[in-house]
Amino acid sequence: MSPLPYRIVRFLFQISSNAFYAVEVGGLENIPPDGCPTILCPNHSNSLTDSILLLSSVPPEKRDMIRMTAKDTFWNKTDAFSLFIKSVGTVPIKRAKDYNNAKVDNTSSFETLEKGNCICLFPEGISRYHSQVANFKPGILTRNKDKEDFSVNLLTVSIVYNHREKFRSNVLVQFNPPIVLTPKHQNLLKTITEDGRRRSCEQAINELTNAMEEMIRSNSLDSPDWQTLRIAHTARKLYAGELGTRISFSEYVKLTKKFIDLMSKVKTVENGISEGSSNNIPNGTSILDEKEFIVERVDAGNLLTVDNPETANEKISHQGVDLAILSRDLTAYQDLLDSRGIKDYRFSNPIPLSKPALIFRIYLRVIWAFVLASLSLPGWALWSPVFIAVKYKEYQIRKLPIEENLDEIAQYKLLISAILLIPIYLIACFFTLPFILITSWLIPLLMWLTIRWTEDLFQSMRSCISLTKLLLLPLSEYSEIRSIRENIRMRVQELAVRELGLPENPENLISKVRPRGMGYFSIRRRRKKDYNEVLRLWDVSAYE
């Protein structure tokens, strides 16, 4: 049985994480049951938030307790945070740098694992706000490499954030199939492989570590840089934007990952050129300079220009050049959409909606926004201490070097929420004491519904702004942007079908029918049009 402080913390983390994010958990069947020694190995891109999500995502019936790890220096302190860490069953880990780089012994810590516990270790070593998973450190495997009778499950976890620091963004916690190391599976760490190849213990460990790393990368939005991730999202929307949330978030991640892998080839080609592979290019000229861009961004505020489509089709045969050009076209097109403040799907129709139809839709959304704001006012009063505290903390963090602190924004938002929720609830119950039997359950329900109504409010306002901009857009400009979109979409479609093996009709990707239409309302989760939506009045396409 897990200790009481752990169960209380897990409950608070479940509330705060599901309030802040729209969480989807997959692969629960891959979690070994209690009593099976297990090392949980997730990627680490969002500081303490990763731990919070893991603790709140694993059902107690699967694992009664997930034991996190922390540096052992906390065990020498008596402050509140150190006492908290020790009270929730955290396992101390000695770090060489805390002992003047001397060799450290973590035998006692790994004995906890051998008793059948589940210990969480982050193979990347540190949390980092980056588009790409860092190389794994092999230290998690070196402890038992020479022990003949050890048996352990290596359970990799892909934690995927759409926008990790944004309120109500989507998160996927995907538990991948475990790698089971038992006496029967010693070949994974043997120095002589089945085909007779010799390798050192370090090589065997590194190969297994690389396999774990690849498993996490393949199930996440792992990208060489933020720009590649951005244009991969644009390409996915052009190919299958109409699917929206009719596919699960895990399917959305897998589909986007295909386009990330495709667009990542541009970087490989460019790196090859920069290293001097210019056999077919006179005088080492960049391959991009040999072809005229199909779409070219001039100055801010100017429209893109498109070449003759027949010329564009001739360039598809040059795969490397075509991907490079397509990459730049996607970037320019997304820049254009951002500058106009209109989402891609609104240009999917050959003819825009008539002005009366646009005005009517704007009118409906304004009325609905007022209704939602009125419903949300009492709940906003309850949530206001949390909103004020988290925005102030975010303001403080953003004054520091972004690259060193951006991964900490979400953790402070979640921790502040978890800390303030209990006093807010108790104070609200105190002021409604005569009706405590009703308010004791009505207050949490109201606070949750306020989040849902606020999401719908922002969506209505965002849609209203977008429709207004579409109303003010000249028809000639709409037609030109539509032409540009179709030019790029046709090339994305061809690459998706021929290179990625995707179906010509994206509707075939839907594996489960999901509720649609105005009559559908879920208390648990908002019916988003696209998983990229967050609590903002604009479409967030860029990454900080």
Image: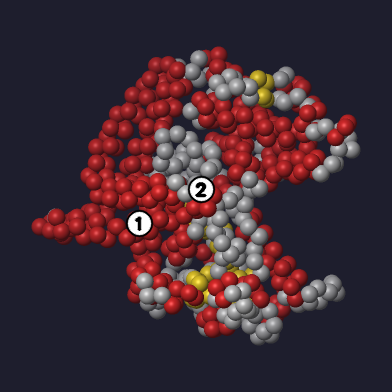
Residue lying farthest to the front in this orientation? 100
The residue under the point 69% across, 41% down is: 263
Sequence-first tag of 1 and 2: 2
Left or right of 133, for residue 206: right
Q: What's the CA distance linking mark 1 and mark 2?
A: 20 Å
The correct choice, above or below, for 365 with respect to 475 in the image is below
Closest to the observer: 543 or 358?
543
Visible residue check, residue 246: no
Displayed quadrant of residue 23: bottom left
Query: Can see residue 192?
Result: yes
Disc 2 residue type (three-letter) = Ile
Q: Where does residue 107 sit, x and y in percent of width and height?
A: 57, 83
Q: Is residue 201 left or right of residue 99?
A: right
Circle 1 residue: 416
Q: Residue at x 56, y 27 (%)?
A: 336
State the mark number for residue 402: 2
For the residue labelled by badge 1, is the local secondary structure a helix, a strand or a loop?
Answer: helix
Horizontally, is 293 left or right of 283 in the view?
A: left
Which three-letter amino acid code belongs to the residue tagged 1? Ile
- State the quadrant of the N terminus: bottom left
State the image quarter where residue 18 is shown. bottom left
Q: Could you tell me which residue is drawn at 40 percent across and 55 percent down?
A: 412
